[in-house]
Structure formats: C-alpha cells, structure tokens
Image (cartoon, coloured by chain):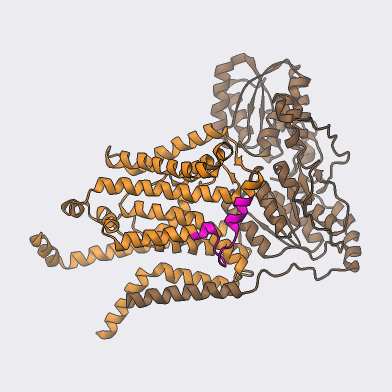
Amino acid sequence: MRNKINKKQILSLGDRYRIYVLFVLVFVVMTLFAPHFFNAWNLTSIMKTVAMNGTVAIGFTIILIVGQLDLSIGTIITFAAVIGLGLKDAVGYGVSVPLAIIAGGLIGLINGLLVAKVKINSFIVTLGMLTALQGAIYTITGGNTIAVTDDQAFAISDWLQHQIVPMLTPRVIIAIVLVVSFSIFLRRTRKGRNFFMVGGNSKTAWLAGVDSDKYTIVAFVISGVMAAIGGILFAMESAAATLNLGTNSLMYVLSATIIGGTSMAGGKGGVFRSFIAVLTLTTLYNGIVLLGLGNEVQIFISGIILASVILYEAFVEYRHDKVVGQRPELLKELNTIQ
Amino acid sequence: MKKSFSLLVVLVLALTFAGAVFANGGSESSTDAAGSGNLEASLALAGQVDALTAADGQPLIKVSGTGREVPARPADPEALPEDNPLHWWDMEFAGWNSTKKNIPDSPKDGAIGKKVIMIVHGDHPWTTACINGATKVADVYNMDFKALSPNWDLAVQNQMIDQAINERPDLLLLIPLDAKTAPQQARKINQAGVPLIMFNTLPEAEAMDYCIAWTGPDDFGQFRKLSHLWADKLGKEGGVAYIQHAPGGSPYFARYWGPRSELAEYAPGIKVLDAQAPGFEADKTQQLVSDWLTRFGDEIVGICAADDSAQGLGISEALKKAGREDIVVIAAGNSKQGMDLVKSGDIYAITYQTAEGDGALAVKTAADWFNGEELPPVRYLPQHMITIDDVEDFYPPQW
C-alpha cells in the first residue's frame, strides 16, 4: 500500500514537474552528444535566444490562465520594434522605447475590451488585430525593414549583448526578473490567484466577488506589454526591425506554454514553467543544429513533442472523466452540497 | 516534499549552468593540413574546380569576365529622383567603395581541410540548389563544410551566427536575411575575429566594411539589361506593370527600380501603370494580373515579374484566361517553371541566375582567400538573358 502511494506520488510529481525533467533530459543529451554545446559562448547564445520568447510567454501564459487566446502577440512584437526603432532618430530611445511598450499595452487593452465587454471570442478579436496590425506595419514602413546604424545604436546593441554576469546579458536579466516577478505575483498574491479563478471557474470567481472582465482586460494588457518589451529589446539588440520579426513567435510560444503545463482550458499554468519550456525548446533546437541536423528535423521534433503533450493532456482529462463516471455517488454528493 | 523537489531542480539547473561557465569555449578551427604543401596542393585544384558543372550542364563557376563598369558616385544619390539610375548607386554598387575594417589577413596556407560554415536565409528549392553547388566546390577542397538554414527567421539566424562563431570556423559564408539587418550581423562576426564572405543578397553598404568580399548575382545589372530586351520588343512604348519581390530585400529594389529607372532613360515612352508585391503564390499573382487586365484593358502591354516560378505561372494563367498572349512578360529566373514558360512562349525572356553557381562562387572565393589571392570587394556571377533561342541549353533545370 505504502509502495503504491509512493509510486502515485512520484507519478504525480513527474507530471507536475515534467518540464523540468524534460529540460534536464534535453540538456544532458545535448551535452553528451552535440559538439560545441557545453561551453559558455553557446549557453549564452541560448539564453539570448530565450530572452524574447521567454518574455512574450509571460503574457501568453496569463492569457491562457484566464481561459483566452491571443493570436496577435507576433504582430505586436513587430509593431513595437517598428515603433521603437522608427521613432529613434526623431525622439531617441528614451522616448521611443516607452512609446513602443505603451503601444503594446494599448493594443492589449483594445483586445481585452472587445473580449470582455463586447463579448467577442478572443480568437476572432486577436485574429482581426493580427491582420489590422500587419496592414499598419506595412503602411508605416512602406514595406521596408527599419535599421539603425549610427554609433549610438550600435553602442546600445553591444551593451545589450554584453554579459553583466556570465551568460546573462541585460536582455536575459530583464526577462528573468519579469518571469520571477510575475511568478511571485501569480502564486503569492490574492490578485494573482484571482487570474486562475477567472479562467478555472468563472462562476466561483463571480461568487467570490472577482470581476472577471477586469482580470481578462488586464491579462490582455499584460500580454501586449510583454510582447512589446520582447520585440523592442530584440530589435534594439539587432539594430533592425524586420517586418516578419515576430511571425514565428506565436507558434513557438504557444507550443512552449502548452508543453510547460499551462492548460488551454484555463485556470492552470505557470509563468516559470513556460519560461523553462521556452528554454527547453531553444536548447533542443540549438543542439539539433550543432548535431548537424536540418531545420526540418527541428520542425518534426517540436511537432512530436507538442503532439505528445497534447495527447497526454487528453489522456489525463479522459482518465479524470472516467474516475468521475466510475464513482457517480461522489458526484451526487458534491451536487447535494452545492 | 514539493519544496525539496523544487530546490533539487533549481540546484541541478544552477550547477549545470555554473559548470558551463568554466567549461572551455568553442573549439579551434581545423587547419590540420596548414602549410606550404597545402597551399600548393590547393592551388593545383583550380583546374578541377573550373571543370565542375551544374545540374543544367553549364560550368559551375563562371566569374563575370569583364567585371562591371562602376560610374562615379553622385554627391548625394538620394537627392536624385528615384527613376534616375544613379539614385540607386549606394545599393547597386554597395561594397565597391567600402572602407574595410578589421579584416583578417589571408593565412595563405591553402583551402584544403578548412572548416567553412555557410548560413543561408531559408528553405527553398533555390537554396537546396545553392547548397548543392557550394558542396561540390567544398568537396574538391575536402573542406569541413556545413550549411545551416534559419528558415527565414531573424532570431534563429542570429542564434546560428552565435553558434557558428562558437565553432570557430576558418571562414563564415552568410546570406543575410535582410539587407538592413546585415551591418550588425557582419560587425558581430568581424569583432569575433571570424573571416566573413557574404553572398547572394546585397547588404547595406555598412555591412560591406566588415566582410572580405561579397559574391552573387548582379541583380541590378541583369535587370537593366533585361529591360532593354523588353523595351525593344515593345517598340519602346506602351503601358507596363511590375510584380515585385518581397519588400525590404535587395531583389525588391533591383528587380523593380533597376528596370524602371533604366527605362526612364532608354525608353521614356514606356509608362508604368502599377506595381504590386503579391508574394510568391501563383493564385494571388493570377488574381492581381486579372485585375490589371480588367482595369487597364489594351493599355497594358508588358509585365515584369520578380520571380519566374510561382509569379510566372500566375501571370501565364491569367493571360491565357483573358486571351491576352500579346502581353510581353519578362522575369527573374531561372527555375524549371520559368524555363518551361520561356519554351512555350508565355514568357519572353528571363535572367540566367544560377543557384548552384551562387553557392559555388562563394566557396570558391573563400578558397581563393585561403590561397592568398588578392580579391576584389565584389565578385559577380555572369550576366545572361535566356530566351526561346537558347533555353534548351539550360535544361535540365537546377531547381
């Protein structure tokens, strides 16, 4: 009996901390087999790549926790980069960067208001926003990449790539600080836990006096701001904003967030786990390249991982439903209490 | 229990990363066969490289024999109107007057056994052919050659550049994803002390300062020449429309402003009706051309496309449906679809743009640098226009 409980506990822990297990597994395998993987330069390169999508994943995780979806994060990344770099010559980074972040927040606010107040499905709202922003980006830029090549821009770019402590550049540190802050906020504060309640059970949230609309709107604003921060910092480091800068981020962040254990049904997830999931995928892709395998292998393996996680989640859900079906008296009891 | 587990996880992560800090950096480049013997053997391989052929039977390496006539740079090219060819001087001749910075000296110890990493822009049949051509030359020199593709993603390309620097190759070959992102990428590679040759996509002029050389098609020159053929066929008058490349890259400017600015002088009677960038899907191009035919009717007599495959097919379908085979079409080539359309008479002329030769020329230039050869800042592929008269010479197609 004791053994059985321990086994269950271990399985439960394995499920809860699967992303950490996966990360350690990927890391160890790549260290053993991928040439040039385990050295400071390469690990710094991994961390730098994680910085943008890791930041964007914060907002996206909160969106999923409140039971919504934000398809516009990729275009917000690009939009913020275009605003931040495009206005640099006119007003300097001191003004253009805050403006880019505010623009991201405003876009999130519009998304949130349309979802929470006008009651339009978040898929439709953010898909519409994605298309509208793409048009805006092409109109503003005339279809051209925005680049900054003056000495000041290069100096800032160099500083953003400079390691303040080993393997941690300013962009990576900003991402980690944001991840830790939001993890604490969501887990340790009442307001933070309310996001889970809104996404997990809106009726309970209503009974508890939690304003679901407000939390939904705030979630979209956070998502917009995080996407903008990720985008503008990446563009400043690259000294350029291409028009498809954020195009691949949506699938990347979506995959990582789900692999990290955040439920698309809402009410469950964690910012730190999403960050570790982004780190895991980036480590995996990095190792695949070092192993001399092509892009097609990356796509194939990430597809396999994502499909496995979704299948596993479906299996857990099925098992849960089955348990409820096998013990109907418990359900009846629960209904009587309610 | 949960706290202990979390602590354990954090500890494992911290230890692994901390350990990495003390781990050695990237390995050194592989120049096992360095020395004068290697140089002599490397120089002796020149004939073998010259004898290589591409899939279409054409010589794999064909450096533009006559070079390019570079006019004097105007004081302020951008002040000139866009339809003045000299307005595009900085882009068209990027690299010709660059001030090289921190360029490493050639080791002059031969190309055999050198470690060369090639980073391309993304997956495409053209890219596959390009890598095939590069591999053919690399194989002759027995190079430790690797090609990486970031699949059109700038973040991934930047990461690949970091990874390539980490591997400390003897030389890095790069197709920048975007002309304007190239300066910072080239600067970073240069500062890391890795010799760099850029190819295919023309970068912004600043990027040229940080690379040994640039090799690739003379896109502007090709399209200026192609536009003459087109104008002559049109009798130097009538309305024309342009289907553009993806905005931002050098082909966008070379394949639109190249012919447009050229014809403003060579055939001022030709009027530009419209220019659009529908992307690289045949159905979208077909729709665009159908709309033009409705809108402009008999006024439109010519179409210039930035791509002879998907765009070429879209144009051909739209013209057939409207019964307007009289319209003279030119395009950048030379894909299988494009050459088939030239053969069938749907396209009047395309540029010869060897994909295999593009990759091969980059590797050959790297080999020349290892051999200590004095290199020009820019090395073009040869110019040639393919028409129905000689299209058969370019079969089977490279991609």
Give the residue at x 31% y 62%.
A187
Q: Colour of chain B?
A: brown
Q: Which residues are magenta?
A: A155-173
Quarter the N terminus of chain B occupies: bottom left
Residue A286 appears in the rendering: no
Report the side of A254 relative to B227 (left or right).
left
Q: Is residue B24 above or below residue A336?
A: below
- Report if residue A159 lies within the magenta region: yes
- Residue B192, x across and y down, in percent: 70, 60
Question: Residue B107: where, in percent of width, then height?
Answer: 84, 62
Residue at point 69%, 49% (across, down): B175
The answer to whether residue A125 is left or right of residue B103 is left
Q: Farthest residue in the left direction?
A: A336
Residue name at image x 82 percent, y 64 percent: B112
Quadrant containing the C terminus of chain B in the rendered view? top right
- Is A119 drawn above or below residue B286 in the view shown? below
Residue B351, quarter of the rendered image:
top right
Q: Is residue A45 magenta?
A: no
Q: Position of residue A181 (x, y in %)?
A: 39, 60
Q: Position of residue B390 (x, y in %)?
A: 80, 34
Colour orange belongs to chain: A
Q: Is residue B182 visible?
A: yes
The answer to which of A95 and A308 lies nearer the viewer is A95
Query: Going by the image, does B39 lie left or right of A316?
Result: right
Of A206 and A170, the residue lying toward us: A170
> Where, by quadrant of the figure, is residue B68 drawn?
top right
Along the line of sight, which residue is nearer the eye, B227 or B262?
Answer: B262
Q: Using the image as rendered, state which of residue A93 and residue A15 is in the foreground.
A: A93
